[in-house]
Amino acid sequence: MSIFIDQGLVSGAQSSTAFGNLYTISGQDGNLGDTPVAGDITVLQVTYAGAAPALATANRLHTLVNTNFGTPIVITALAGGIDPFSGLDITGNGATYVDSSSGADVIRVVYDVNQCNFAGIFTFDTGGNPITTPNPVILYHELSHAFRGATGTTQPNDEIPARTDENVMRGQLGLCLRDVNSNGLGCGPGSDCGAPPPNGCFIVSATTGSSESAEVKSLRQLRDRIADVSCLGARLIDMIYREYYQFSPSIADEIGQSAASRQAVLWVVVRPLLAWYTLAGTLAFEHADQNAANNAVKDVLNACPRYLGAKSIASVLNTIRSGEPLPTDAPEMLLHFAPRIQFAARLRFASWAILDPLVRVWSASAQQRDVIDEVSQWLATAPLEALAQPSDLDKELKALANFFDFRPTARHQLGERLATAWPDAITMLARHDFI
């Protein structure tokens, strides 16, 4: 075994993001995993079960993971800034090198997963056009260097074979291909040639049987619509994904192996959440269309039928969220997954995005509450104050204010928290009716 993920105990690395990028490289085939290393809490060892897969990037990753090259490869995903091992500023870039500071050689793969402080990272195609370079592509490029470093086949100009390998990854994701002879890169947007962002909706994909199912595409469309309007919304989604990566792949792997589990998660989690998000999107973007809002409310109620035991489901979800032990007569599936769901409940962004809506939607069904009121209260608790204040805050608040036109009281609730977190923004908050 040769690949390890830096857990960030010293470096500040984002291990969940690194695993999520590896999961994309693997083609989300369900065989990737990680495990603690005895005597070393600073890293996780990457595992890849099964025979070598056919997908080119997955096959390369399988080889890297399951071959003992004698020199370990350690992946460090950083939020830009200074690489603590080499002292290099890796903002907007990645680096692969041999680190001998511990007395033994380690091949380090370090890359910026914050994409130039959320500005994006671009390279160039053969026409000289800037093209997007998402995190899984950056990581696969650096792993190409690591592979040749581990096998002793590094070339005088090792960038050309690395960019060639990078284009294999790009082709699989449907992204624009890079000019392998171009050294150019920078911070900013670029064309993606129409490819969807490579963030994995792991649990939804597992329950619906495809990463291209209608449910997954619907979530992507809503995510992209929010990100197009609001940078704050895009940052919030990014934080949700980072936390989601910490628990979703292992759950998705398990439910993917059980038809009964897939069906249960589809009914209890996926369909209610999808209906909830659709209603929230309708209220935020199309609140003037009363028919659309009414239909979205009906879809929410239909997704949480009372005959499934809405009251019992709401009670169990509340218990899990509180961290209390489940009763022994709780459904076996929930007992099995409870520790990981309780872990998710301690993650601020994932808990808000997943557990809170589930508790609200099943409780609303059981107690016949006003679903629109529940959605407005949920949006009012969006943890935006935990994000860095954007430089173009006035523009952001103007866009964000529109999301709450259907229920201005919710906007005011959010505004009170933002005024405390960003006291120098009070004038702008007042201008856009947040306070």
Image: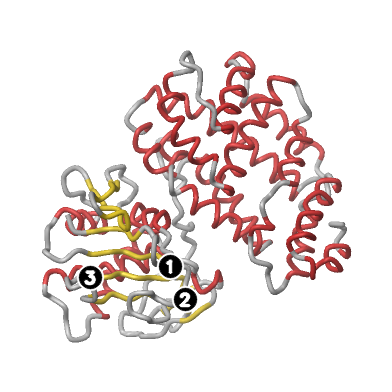
Amino acid, disc 3: Ile
Q: How far apart are marks 3 and 1 (CA)?
A: 16 Å
Q: Which residue is drawn at 69% across and 39% down?
A: 279
Instruction: Tell me the quarter of the picture where residue 124 sits.
Output: bottom left
Q: Which residue is drawn at 47% across and 39% down?
A: 204
Which of the marked residues, 3 or 1, is nearer the chain's N terminus? 1
Check disc 1 and report the residue beneath it. 78
Q: Residue at x 83, y 68 (%)?
A: 428
Label 1: which secondary element: strand
Q: Image height check: is 184 above or below 20? A: below
Amino acid, disc 2: Gly
Number of residues whose C-alpha sits closer than 10 Å to that of mark 1, classed few (under 14), some (14–19) or many (20 or more): many
Amino acid, disc 1: Leu
Q: Image height check: is 233 above or below 193? A: above
Q: Image height check: is 163 above or below 373? A: below
Q: Are marks 2 and 1 in contact (CB under 8 Å)?
A: yes
Q: How far apart are marks 2 and 1 (CA)?
A: 8 Å
Q: Distance between the residues labelled 2 and 3?
A: 20 Å
Check disc 2 and report the residue beneath it. 81
Task: Name the residue nearer the viewer: 116 or 14.
Answer: 14
Instruction: Tell me the quarter of the picture where residue 74 sits.
Output: bottom left
- Residue 423, x across and y down, in percent: 79, 66
Q: Is residue 176 visible?
A: yes
Describe residue 299's horizontal placement relative to residue 130 as left or right.
right
Which of the marked residues, 2 or 3, is nearer the chain's N terminus? 2
Q: Residue 107 carries which label?
A: 3
Describe residue 187's horizontal placement relative to residue 36 as left or right.
right
